[in-house]
Image (cartoon, rainbow, N blue to C red):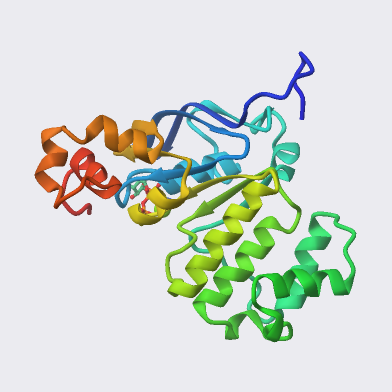
Amino acid sequence: MTNDAGTSSAAILDVEQLVVTYGTRTAVDGVTFQVKRGEIFGLLGPNGAGKTSTLSAIEGLLKPHAGTVRVDDIDIQHDPIEAKTHLGVQLQASSFQSELTIEEIARLYAGLYGLRITKNGIADRIRDVGLGDELGKRYKSLSGGQQQRLSLLIAVIHQPALLLLDEPTSGLDPQSRRQLWTRIENLRTGGGSILLTTHSMEEAQAVCDRVAIIDHGKLITVDTPAGLIATHRDDPRVVNVARGEVTLEDVFIGLTGSEIRG
Ligand SMILES: Nc1ncnc2c1ncn2[C@@H]1O[C@H](COP(=O)(O)OP(=O)(O)OP(=O)(O)O)[C@@H](O)[C@H]1O
Ligand SMILES: [Mg+2]
């Protein structure tokens, strides 16, 4: 996608001064960040920080109270249909028609995106996510991890430029988790960009090119994991919680506090 000057901007996603409210509650309070093309970007924050609300506004699932979101240079509010064709989405809790089989669901979504894909092509995609033996199984009889893998397959079926993943590894066993990260890294190698949320600081540190820490709806900091550690390793709040070498988790807890959120 090119802009008026005929050049492609460096950001696949540009979020400016985003505000999301539910009634009188402000869940996202003026958040600004960019995801660069070819980047794996992690949105980190305690429960209730505003991560899912931010993603929902980017996806166009809820209308922001204020601010702008541009996906691949397209304003999501001006041209939501076009913007959505550039997006793949895996929600925190996704669910599909329970009586349909994996194969039927994949064909349904391929059809919705207008993809020309053969029955064998669909079967190959399903095999790619390790569900080859479950082609004819109904959605309701899949395990949680299998449901998760199917929702990832659906999210990328139209090869979107930007993939949004809300806690993609929660509920997955270590094997599936590793495979998922490999898949995410492969997507990036193929030119895709990924914005994800996770509560695993270890995974974020290992896989994300950059991370943002959000708390109480406000963005506290954005940097590479190594950059965040270097900047904050001597902060007394971080030193206080670190046990040995400072990790991203120490920085996260140091900056967001140790209390459990309601
Ligand atoms: N549909 C809703 N109606 C009212 N309040 C909501 C709604 N969805 C979220 N909230 C509130 O908005 C705030 C942000 O919620 P959000 O789901 O964005 O957090 P999160 O960072 O995704 O948390 P988690 O890590 O638990 O998934 C919370 O205070 C939450 O209670
Ligand atoms: Mg959430």
* Left or right, residue 41 beside residue 238: right
User: Camera-side residue: 25 or 74?
Assistant: 74
Kindly indicate the quadrant of the structure image that contains residue 81: top right
Considering every residue shown, the one lying at the far top of the view is 5
Q: Is residue 215 above or below residue 2?
A: below
* Left or right, residue 110 beside residue 183: right
Q: Residue at x 49, y 60 (%)?
A: 168
Is the N terminus in the top left, top right, bottom left or bottom right quadrant?
Answer: top right
Kindly indicate the quadrant of the structure image that contains residue 107: bottom right
* Left or right, residue 56 beside residue 98: left
Q: Position of residue 42 (x, y in %)?
A: 45, 45
Q: Position of residue 108 (x, y in %)?
A: 78, 67
Q: Position of residue 237 (x, y in %)?
A: 13, 38
Q: Residue at x 64, y 31 (%)?
A: 77
Q: Is residue 129 above or below residue 52?
A: below
Q: Is residue 20 above or below residue 123?
A: above
Is the C terminus in the top left, top right, bottom left or bottom right quadrant?
Answer: bottom left
Q: Is residue 52 above or below residue 132?
A: above
